[in-house]
Image (cartoon, rainbow, N blue to C red):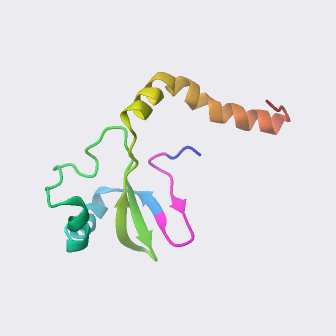
Amino acid sequence: MNVGATDELRGRRVTLIPAIAGHIEQLLRIRYTPEVEARWGHAPEAADWPFDEPGIAPFTVMLNGAIVGFIQPYLLAAERDYLKQNTFKLAYLDFDWKLNDRAGIRH
């Protein structure tokens, strides 16, 4: 599945929605709770957090309509390099599979 900045991901308990500027205040409140600081430390976030990493689509975690967290995909350097080198191939691979499946063509 391709996940973009406009996708909403629904699970059994939570929904991931694209993070927007209106979520930042609540996300920062959560970020600086003792439980989260114990895991991630107290380093202040960048001024443009959570939009400070180019090419990464951050998501807000929602539970029963309330903001309860944040998730940001993380790629290893090798994964980023692979995606850069194969972007064209990857962009059309999913489309090709769907088109072939609808046409009854099997690989």
Q: Quadrant of residue 52?
A: top left
48, above or below 89, in the image: below
Q: Work out which quarter of the rendered image holds the C terminus and state it.
A: top right
Name the residue rendered at 22%, 70% in the picture.
Answer: 29
Name the residue rendered at 35%, 66% in the picture.
Answer: 69
Name the residue rendered at 47%, 22% in the picture.
Answer: 85
Q: Nearer the viewer, residue 41 or 19?
A: 41
Q: Is residue 6 left or right of residue 28?
A: right
Q: Is residue 44 left or right of residue 20?
A: left
14, above or below 94, in the image: below
Query: Where residue 48 sits: x, y (%)?
Result: 21, 48
Query: Where residue 19 sits: x, y (%)?
Result: 36, 56
* 97 part of magenta stretch: no
Name the residue rendered at 59%, 46% in the picture.
Answer: 1
* 8 part of magenta stretch: yes
Q: Residue furthest right?
A: 104
Q: Quadrant of residue 89?
A: top right
Q: Is residue 32 left or right of residue 66?
A: left
64, above or below 58, in the image: below
85, above or below 104, in the image: above
Q: Which residues are magenta?
A: 4-15
Query: Where residue 50 sits: x, y (%)?
Result: 27, 52
Magenta stretch, main secondary structure, is: loop
Query: Where residue 51 sits: x, y (%)?
Result: 28, 47
**Residue 54 in view:** yes
Q: Nearer the viewer, residue 23 or 85?
A: 85
